[in-house]
Image: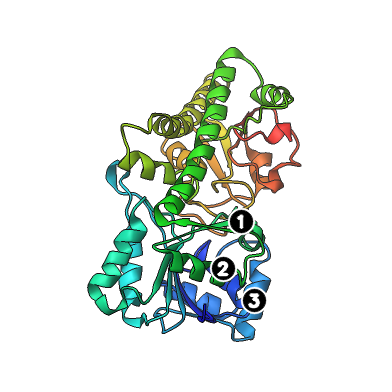
Amino acid sequence: MGERFDEAVILGLGYIGLPTAALMAKNGIKVTGVDTNEEVVDTVNKGKIHIVEPELSGLVKIVIEENKLAASTKPICADVFIIAVPTPFKDNHVPDISYIESATKMIIPYLRSGNLFIIESTSPIFTTEKIANLIFSERPELEGNIYIAYCPERVLPGNAVYELENNDRVVGGINEESNQAAITFYSKFVNSNIYPTNARTAEMCKLTENASRDVNIAFANELSMICDKANINVWELINLTNKHPRVNILQPGSGVGGHCIAVDPWFIVSDFPDESIIIKTAREINNYKTLWVIEQIKNSILQFKMENNRKPKVALMGIAFKPNIDDLRESPAKQVVKEMLTFKNAEYFIVEPNVDSLDLGELTSHEDACNKADIIVFLVAHREFLTLERQKQELDFCGIRRR
């Protein structure tokens, strides 16, 4: 294949786009990162980052100083265009691909013969084909002259740089030529295997990965509610059950959050409602677990108030959707805190060590909160919480005391 793919534009400088841009730049690709948020653009161009992601800060600083990465609010002509924008859902959990469509329309004027166009955003099935039709409807001369593929990320927030470089990837082109072009490009900065397939299968692969994890978490969350009613320590139960050589139960929590697991299964349910019974039920269980947590906290507050004839001081520990990151997207812990702040039977201390400010209210350090609180509510197992001394009254929804 003659294309060198030495220059790339990536649209979206969030939790996936920025690490991907920096990794590409590290491996000799000239990258322009595009974001509609001018503050994000300015931050990146200063060699800094706007998210919490280990190893990324130093890498961005280096590639900016070496002029291998630049951020902008507008795209430029390049060899490769990557879409890494959000794909939320609308009412009734219907997928919203408007961000992908808007990003595509932004770069259509810059496309040239021989370009490679890639969607990395998590997408419902048929999205890549729809976007290809959108491109060709506005630029019919490009049909058969550019490569189009879907390549979903497989990244664990907090370890993004390593996983982008070392995890296997799946690429789904609209034709075999597109597959080969995508493999040529990703081979420049991915050290692991790259598996070709068609676009629909690649789209479904990403959704299936996260739906599978959601179902397994739902099983653990359901167990936790059963064990609470039966007065069984769920953490001990799971630990013992997992001694079986063919059993691997995951850990329960306050629900399920993040930009993937809490969202992606609905993409399958929306398109195939009659067939996706288990997937839908798992989503409902994980959403219900958050409501269950809220009720447990309220009951403890009312019990304390009745026994002590005063409002308790309650420390709400953790807002992010998983430990040791600043990502609040679809966070069940944030939903819990938001709901508890409307429950006026207590005084609350909000703790999230990975962010500097929060729209819900003033933040308190974990040490101060625990020193002042009557009830400690562990929602997220951040590393800062693991060494805290055991308090008289704790509600542990994330397994702090099992660690």
Q: Nearer the viewer, residue 162 or 71?
A: 162
Which amino acid, by three-letter code, is at mark 2?
Tyr
Q: Earlier in the sequence, mark 1 or mark 3?
A: 3
Which residue position is annotated with label 1? 168
Q: Secondary structure at mark 1?
A: loop
Q: Is residue 375 above or below residue 132?
A: above
Relative height, residue 68 to residue 55 (above, below): below
Q: Amino acid at mark 1?
A: Asp
Question: Which secondary structure lies at badge 3?
Answer: helix
Q: Nearer the viewer, residue 12 or 230?
A: 12
| Numbered tag placed on residue 186 in the rendering | 2
Residue 127 image offset from top left, x and y in percent: 34, 57
Residue 281 appears in which quarter of the rendering? top left
**Residue 233 in picture, x, y percent from top left:** 66, 21
173 horizontally vs 105: left or right: right
* Residue furthest out toward the left: 137
218 vs 109: above or below:
above
Q: Is residue 314 left or right of residue 281?
A: right
Q: Is residue 252 left or right of residue 176?
A: right
Would you place residue 210 above or below residue 11 in this image?
above
Inter-mark Cα distance, 2 to 3: 13 Å
Q: Amino acid at mark 3?
A: Lys
